[in-house]
Image: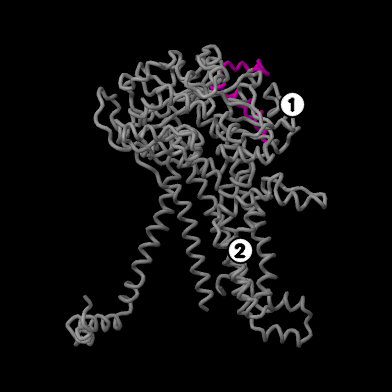
């Protein structure tokens, strides 16, 4: 049984009803009061942001002030700064924090070093067709699961893995599982996140500027150093925030290819999963937050964020 | 322009994701205190039961079609089984506290903690008919009975063995291959990733440095703990990776990334290569003695008891313990084992051997070896020491 077309025709051009009038009145009110428009627009995302982001951070801070009974595992909700003091004074946490920052910096440096030439080629040299193909090539690894990539590196880096086999002829061996493995794997996993913003920035560098530099007698190196690179700084910073912050909080890769080494994420993980010490875990989790805030503040001072 | 906003939005999203993942650390679970009186009679089965277990303890044939003692249980009782596998007692403790599991199988380093935190319910062994077949020397032990109340039924017991790659070394007779002589295999030594592994070092010191006066590896005063920690810190130099995921250790031994270290029989079974062998060194072994417990928050108590009785059935117990590689809990189970040497291999029923294994216990301030002149280090000290050792 299909409805007759006559019927649909009759209902389609509906005459203005009271509903339409209400809508029109509301829109005129909204036009007059800009603040109301703003509230309606931002209410949902702001609630979300406050609930997920601010409340969670506050909960984290409060949890760090609790303590736990080691035998029964019961949380004691009386406030104490013992956890914070322990995290601040124990040399262990300093060592691990420094190691984590070191790995994050190294990963970021490697990624930027690889991403710059690729982005330059994609943005300025390649034909539109090659450019599209390259974007696809950069994006494709993002489709594979993070875990799959980490485990792939576990087998690559193992004693009888591909890396050892490939390095064998030149007398080298696989670095095996450890911090080197972590740096390699992380640099691989986060590379697309660094290439994309730099490529986006590279596309916005006006070709005329590069040409003008050439016309005025600057060598290629000088042009890159004095024209292209300064214009790219905001993009590089954006990319580095990704690789830096993502490495800073990671513990899965470290578990898979890190051998016996620990990073901050592992300390959080052990304290939640194994030691059942949520408050201490929360206190440790504050370290990367502080580092990240420091990093963002430093970046802000350079003014790179303003031009982003 | 759109590109920058996109980048910025992506950035905000990622920051939020980072914050979210960090804040997950802040999600606690409130414990509901349930009454722990043991039931005196059972009702009708609820239709499902959830079990928290060591790997290899609850097999439904999905890992190996021939290894299946869940299907028969489901058919007989109508209780559908869901399982969660854990790698360390600490992980299990956390999971058990969530209250999502009706039955928990726990080693001796976990049972007392579960009882003390009110997570384990008293078990009426009269409702587990197969309990009477269990070896007497496994009943009413300090890890399953408190104040005369039973908190579970024994599963089996076994030892943390020394696994080695026979292509690389001859059969070791001492744990020194992973301690003092570990540098010969630098970067290829492995160890169990849990604070309880400190006991292995303490047991080794007990034999090699009698001056320290260690009489029980789970009762260490501050000096003794410091000595064990020093030993483990030296060992750390030679460790390739620590393991808590048994499949991770299996893969590391298969690829040759690890060549020597502590293990469970089941891992050697999983690897199943002629060059990977296990041995019991002269200093002795630590081990486990496991107990099936019912959660005080259990929603499916009847199915839980049905499972307890099922797993205590000598035939099922033989299958489960033989698969994992540990001694079964009854003499009758030996008759059902697929290998005639099974009980001889694991010295099942050999009370003297069973008493020689240093079963996992939870270290507490009140020394387990009976010393009253000093205070012993407790598990939180061990946990802290363990993170320090790993560095």
Q: Which residue is mark 1?
A: B170
For the stretch drawn in magenta, the main secondary structure is helix
Q: Chain of mark 1?
A: B
Q: Chain of mark 2?
A: A
In the image, taking residue B336 as reference, residue B48 lies left or right, namely: left
Instruction: Out of B362 and A282, give the one closest to the viewer.
Output: B362
Structural crowding at the residue carrying mark 2, measured as other residues with C-alpha within 10 Å and reported as few (<14), some (14–19) or many (≥20): many
Task: State the SS at label 1.
Answer: loop
Q: Position of residue A175 (x, y in %)?
A: 72, 48
Q: Which residue is mark 2?
A: A240
Q: Position of residue A180 (x, y in %)?
A: 69, 50
Q: Position of residue A270 (x, y in %)?
A: 52, 41
As for residue B224 lying within the magenta part, the answer is yes
Measured along the vertical axis of the image, is residue A150 above or below residue B213?
below
Using the rendered view, name the quadrant where residue B112 is placed: top left
Structural crowding at the residue carrying mark 1, measured as other residues with C-alpha within 10 Å and reported as few (<14), some (14–19) or many (≥20): few
Q: Position of residue B164 (x, y in %)?
A: 68, 30
Using the rendered view, name the quadrant where residue B269 is placed: top right
**In the image, what residue occupies the spot 52% across and 54% down?**
A289
Which contiguous range is marked in magenta?
B207-236
Circles 1 and 2, Cβ within 8 Å, touching? The answer is no
Instruction: Out of B217 and A119, give the one closest to the viewer.
Output: A119
Task: State the SS at label 2.
Answer: helix
């Amino acid at each position: 049984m299909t409805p007759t077309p006559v019927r649909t025709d009759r209902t389609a051009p509906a005459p203005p009803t009271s509903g339409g009038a209400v809508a029109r009145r509301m829109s005129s009110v909204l036009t007059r009061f800009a603040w109301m428009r703003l509230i309606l627009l931002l209410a949902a995302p702001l609630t979300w942001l406050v609930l997920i982001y601010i409340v969670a951070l506050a909960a984290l801070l409060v949890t760090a002030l609790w303590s736990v009974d080691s035998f029964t595992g019961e949380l004691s909700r009386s406030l104490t700064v013992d956890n914070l003091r322990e995290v601040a004074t124990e040399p262990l946490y300093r060592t691990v924090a420094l190691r984590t920052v070191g790995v994050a910096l190294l990963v970021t440096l490697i990624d930027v070093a690889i991403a710059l030439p690729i982005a330059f080629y994609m943005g300025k040299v390649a034909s539109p067709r090659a450019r599209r193909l390259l974007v696809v090539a950069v994006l494709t690894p993002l489709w594979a699961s993070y875990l799959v990539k980490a485990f792939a590196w576990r087998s690559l880096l193992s004693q009888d893995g591909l890396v050892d086999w490939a390095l064998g002829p030149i007398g080298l061996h696989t670095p095996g599982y450890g911090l080197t493995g972590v740096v390699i794997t992380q640099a691989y996993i986060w590379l697309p996140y660094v290439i994309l913003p730099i490529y986006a920035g590279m596309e916005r560098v006006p070709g005329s500027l590069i040409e003008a530099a050439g016309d005025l007698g600057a060598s290629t190196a000088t042009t890159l150093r004095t024209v292209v690179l300064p214009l790219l700084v905001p993009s590089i910073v954006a990319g580095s925030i990704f690789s830096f912050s993502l490495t800073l909080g990671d513990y899965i890769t470290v578990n898979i290819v890190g051998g016996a080494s620990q990073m901050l994420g592992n300390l959080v993980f052990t304290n939640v999963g194994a030691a059942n010490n949520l408050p201490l875990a929360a206190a440790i989790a504050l370290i990367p937050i502080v580092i990240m805030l420091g990093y963002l503040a430093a970046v802000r001072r350079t003014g790179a964020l303003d031009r982003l | 322009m759109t590109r920058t906003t996109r980048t910025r939005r992506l950035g905000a999203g990622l920051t939020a994701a980072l914050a979210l993942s960090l804040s997950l650390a802040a999600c606690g679970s409130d414990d509901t205190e349930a009454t722990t009186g043991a039931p005196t009679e059972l009702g009708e089965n609820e239709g499902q039961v959830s079990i928290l277990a060591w790997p290899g303890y609850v097999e439904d044939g999905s890992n190996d079609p021939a290894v299946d003692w869940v299907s028969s249980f489901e058919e007989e009782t109508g209780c559908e089984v869901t399982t969660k596998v854990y790698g360390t007692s600490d992980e299990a403790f956390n999971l058990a506290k969530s209250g999502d599991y009706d039955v928990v199988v726990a080693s001796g380093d976990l049972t007392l903690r579960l009882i003390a935190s009110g997570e384990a319910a008293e078990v009426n062994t009269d409702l587990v008919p197969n309990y009477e077949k269990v070896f007497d020397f496994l009943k009413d032990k300090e890890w399953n009975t408190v104040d005369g109340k039973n908190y579970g039924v024994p599963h089996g017991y076994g030892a943390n063995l020394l696994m080695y790659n026979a292509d690389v070394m001859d059969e070791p007779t001492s744990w020194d291959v992973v301690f003092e002589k570990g540098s010969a295999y630098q970067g290829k030594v492995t160890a169990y990733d849990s604070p309880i592994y400190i006991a292995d070092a303490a047991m080794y010191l007990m034999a090699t440095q009698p001056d320290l006066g260690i009489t029980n590896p789970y009762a260490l005063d501050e000096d003794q703990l410091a000595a064990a920690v020093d030993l483990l810190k030296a060992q750390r130099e030679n460790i390739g990776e620590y393991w808590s995921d048994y499949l991770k250790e299996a893969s590391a031994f298969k690829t040759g990334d690890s060549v020597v270290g502590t293990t469970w029989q089941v891992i050697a079974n999983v690897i199943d290569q002629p060059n990977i062998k296990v041995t019991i060194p002269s200093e002795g072994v630590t081990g486990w003695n496991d107990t099936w417990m019912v959660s005080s928050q259990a929603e499916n108590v009847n199915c839980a008891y049905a499972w307890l009785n099922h797993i205590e059935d000598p035939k099922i117990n033989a299958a489960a313990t033989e698969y994992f590689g540990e001694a079964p809990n009854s003499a009758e189970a030996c008759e059902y084992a697929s290998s005639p040497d099974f009980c001889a291999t694991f010295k099942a029923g050999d009370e003297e051997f069973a008493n020689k294994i240093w079963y996992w216990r939870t270290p507490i301030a009140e020394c387990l070896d009976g010393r009253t002149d000093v205070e012993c280090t407790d598990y939180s000290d061990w946990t802290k020491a363990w993170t320090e050792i790993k560095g």
